[in-house]
């Protein structure tokens, strides 16, 4: 089976329905993955692009963006690199009502044995329950 890496614009076309031809092709790709004709692979940077684009370009509220990530994770025939970390990030983002990227960073601290974060964006990380490093 062919392994095909899916870029963010494949998901954006399906989620926004703003380009009929690209949407049709993207939906066919997902149908092919679901049918086992191809194995789609994607990773966190793609999800970061999706979330940023939906929030900033399409002005979709955070809850809608997190729902979109949840839908991508549920795609049959999709292999996600760092799936456990992504799922933990989504859980944290939903629980703390924070952005996916910040929640991913927070989840990465634990996954990499870090006790705290050095950041100037203290409010968001405090909401995510992350210990702040004073520097």
Image (cartoon, grey):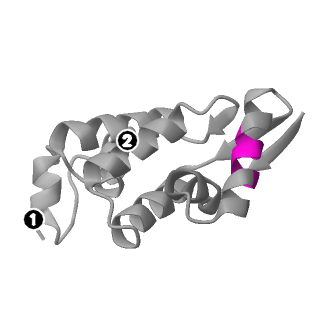
The total number of labels drawn is 2
Cβ–Cβ below 8 Å for labels 2 and 1?
no
Q: Position of residue 78 (x, y in %)?
A: 66, 36
First in sequence, mark 2 or 1: give its number: 2
Is residue 77 on the magenta stretch? no
At 48% across and 37% down in the image, what residue appears? 71
Nearest the camera: 110 or 85?
Answer: 85
1 to the left or right of 124:
right
Quarter occupied by the N terminus: top right
Q: Position of residue 74 (x, y in %)?
A: 53, 30
Q: Main secondary structure of the magenta part?
A: helix
Disc 2 is placed on an element classified as helix
Quarter occupied by the C terminus: bottom left
Q: Is residue 3 above or below residue 12?
A: above
Q: Is residue 30 above or below residue 62?
A: above
Nearest the camera: 103 or 36?
Answer: 36
Residue interval drawn in magenta: 25-30
At 47% across and 32% down in the image, what residue appears? 84
The circle drawn on residue 134 is: 1
The circle drawn on residue 67 is: 2
Q: Position of residue 104 (x, y in %)?
A: 36, 49
At 36% across and 51% down in the image, what residue appears? 65
Q: CA distance from mark 2 to mark 1?
A: 34 Å
Disc 1 is placed on an element classified as loop
Q: Is residue 83 above or below residue 17?
A: above
């Amino acid at each position: 089976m062919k392994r095909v890496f899916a870029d963010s614009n494949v998901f954006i076309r399906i989620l926004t329905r703003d380009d009929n031809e690209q949407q049709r092709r993207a939906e066919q790709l997902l149908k092919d993955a679901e049918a086992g004709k191809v194995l789609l692979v994607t990773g966190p940077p793609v999800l970061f692009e999706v979330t940023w684009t939906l929030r900033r370009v399409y002005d979709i509220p955070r809850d809608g963006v997190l729902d979109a990530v949840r839908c991508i994770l549920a795609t049959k025939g999709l292999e996600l690199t760092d799936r456990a970390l992504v799922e933990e990030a989504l859980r944290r983002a939903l629980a703390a009502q924070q952005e996916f990227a910040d929640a991913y960073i927070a989840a990465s601290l634990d996954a990499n044995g870090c006790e705290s974060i050095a950041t100037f964006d203290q409010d968001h990380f405090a909401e995510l329950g992350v210990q702040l490093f004073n520097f």
